[in-house]
Image (spheres, rainbow, N blue to C red):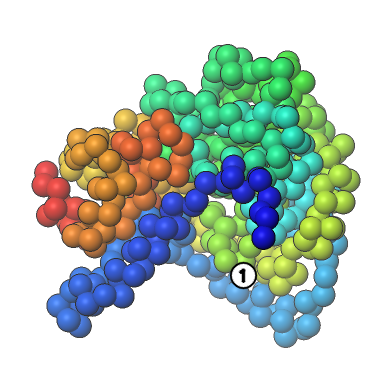
Amino acid sequence: MKLAHRLDRIDPFYVMECAKAAALLAASPACDPARGGESMIYLNIGEPDFTAPPAVLAAAQRCLTDGRTQYTAATGLEPLREALSRWYAQRFGLTIGAERIVITAGASAALQLACLALFEAGDEVLVPDPSYPCNRHFVAAADARPVLMPCGPAQRYQPDAAGIERAWTDRTRGVLLASPSNPTGTSIAADEMGRNVQAVRSHGGVTVVDEIYLGLSYDPAYGRSALAHDAPGGRDVVSVNSFSKYFSMTGWRLGWLVLPPALVAPVEKLAQNLFICPSSVAQHAALACFEPDSIAEYEARRTAFAKRRDFLVPALQALGLGVPVMPDGAFYVWADASGHGPSSWDLAFELMDRAHVALTPGRDFGPTQAETHLRISYASSLPQLQEAVHRLQRHLGG
């Protein structure tokens, strides 16, 4: 069987390889408390321990009971698009018409649709290093070429306009950013985002921003949508978002795009052919995300995540795992592990085996810091984080 050459441009997803190894070890006697072992603590996967709140679960149940499981429009339920439009106005002070919002089968589908609509063979797309690996792979799957821009702690691990200008070539079509970022938990400041958008615009390019963690921002200096820097009504900024993180609906596979008006019909055509529509049950349930009780619950959870961050970062630093930039959003710490050996990959497996704490080595997130950094998730409960730190201290000292 002959495989498509585009597969050669897609790297393995090492996060999942590590997760499989952790699951295998977790099933062994060494991790069985009934046999004197200690269960595995997972700080490797970006999945909140919070699940969908009661109103969302009740809405899903009503949807099933009432038999509202038919196909929806490819662009999603109109009431859900309208609810998101109101959310942008209330949360960010932005006027985003519902007609610019396309509901998708998760943020992954949103990224795929955006990349297929915008990029083609021969195009180059600028992507920060470090960044979430799937983002650049969506570019590659559209037969375009992701071009990594190394970003260090002095830049908060985020691109700036000067870096974009240096990297831009005649083949560059746009940039794919993430704010807040996975794996660093850092955001692009509003004024810098504005300069980034303007730099891309000056070349006739498009700015695509992964904002799936935008609701989980902890610093008022950040937590602002890149859409604020688009032209009125939409011109050249595309926002990708999701119900998975802030709205605690990871397995429901529901996301959305905010598009310039000229891009809505092309994306709709792609969505009709590739996905038919997002899950109708998930869409009906997501309407309950915007009820006052649900928003209050989400805000309480955001506060809980911030408390976890405030515990974990100094604890890691005391263990010799440096955190040069305080995360301001999401639920990840990008920790410098170079003081504990030359390979974060080897260290992650050592800690998994001996401390029974699963962490993610930097290999997935770009070559610049791959061997020196670990991504550590604080999506787990505070007691789990405290026990994990205890085990790491036992093994690493400090």
Q: Position of residue 72 (x, y in %)?
A: 83, 66
91 left or right of 219 in image: right
Q: Which quadrant of the figure contains the C terminus?
A: top left
Question: Residue 235, position in %: x, y?
Answer: 80, 30
Q: Relative to the observer, which residue lies in front, 84 or 14?
A: 14
* Residue 242 visible, this angle: yes
Q: Which residue is mark 1?
A: 56
Q: Is residue 90 visible?
A: no
Residue at (26, 58) in percent of width and height: 352
Q: Residue furthest front?
A: 1
- Three-letter amino acid code of the residue under disc 1: Val
In the image shown, does 168 or 251 lie closer to the viewer? Answer: 168
Q: Is residue 60 left or right of residue 75?
A: left
Residue under the point 33% across and 53% down: 359
Residue 269 % position (x, y): 87, 51
Q: Is residue 321 left or right of residue 367?
A: left
Q: Residues within 10 Å of mark 1 (few under 14, many from 20)?
A: many
Where's residue 127, x and y in %? Answer: 57, 32
Q: Residue at x 64, y 41 (%)?
A: 140
